[in-house]
Amino acid sequence: MLKYMLKPKIHSTTQDFTEILDIVDDIIFFKGGNTCMAMEGSSVNFFLLSNDEQNARIYGYMSLLNSLSSYIQILIVSRRVDLGSYVKTLEEKIATVKNPKIAEQLNLYHDFIKDLIKDDELLDKKIYVVVPFSQLELGPINATKGGIQNKNISLNESVKSGLITKRNNIMVQIERMGLVARPLSTNELIKLFYEMLNQEFITLDFDSADIKNVIL
């Protein structure tokens, strides 16, 4: 009879494979002691703009780059969208509609959505601007006092103030480009990283009220 030895359980988590230590007060803390904030930026179809508008966007971007005193990261995240739940809710709504004209319009819309996602190539694109802050920016003495030691998070007010100042300056430059940047909250950051590390598809949830807004 073969005897099997019990192997020790593996308690590793996704967090063990990332540099992220925690997210507190809209600030991302890394294991090395550095921090950052993130913003979600709006987008525009550059090729649909007039020449003057294109030039204005280009000069605005140049102004943004020239205003930087440290590096930033511009991150574009593209993922496929799963509209299965939306289609199902739409079909349930069609089955309960009594007005034939509304039912006809809903069926046309349903066919449009089905045709839109038949090739499974519907993408959701988000643009994020990451604003970092190094403990070295506080100076060697302050960095040691206010840094992250022994994996215990110490939210230094100088770190928070420095991050907010840098973030606000970049937001102003982005607005001069005719775009909008919105700071991400702690919950939004947690959801963003969870989806990036665990989900290949984005599932959009809708209810009957959303469909009512579309056609009724």
Image (cartoon, rainbow, N blue to C red):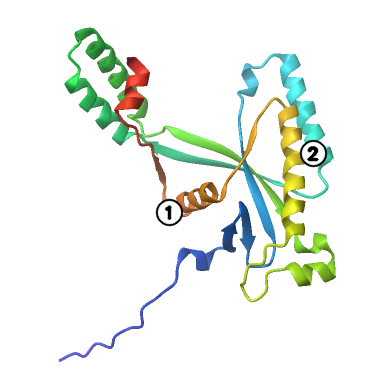
User: Of all residues shown, which one is farthest toward the top?
Assistant: 101
Residue at 48%, 35% in the rendered image: 124
Left or right of residue 161, residue 140 in this image: right
Left or right of residue 116, residue 151 in this image: right
Image quarter of residue 117 = top left
The circle on residue 134 is none
Is residue 131 positioned above or below 204 on the image?
Answer: below
Query: Circle 2 sits in a helix, a strand or a loop, which is it?
Result: helix
User: Of all residues shown, which one is farthest toward the left?
Assistant: 1
Q: Position of residue 50 (x, y in %)?
A: 69, 14
Residue at 47%, 54% in the rendered image: 197
Query: Type of residue at label 2?
Result: Leu
Q: Position of residue 42 (x, y in %)?
A: 61, 31
The circle on residue 65 is 2
Q: Earlier in the sequence, mark 2 or mark 1?
A: 2
The circle on residue 198 is 1
Q: Position of residue 27 (x, y in %)?
A: 63, 54
Is residue 24 positioned above or below 202 on the image?
Answer: below
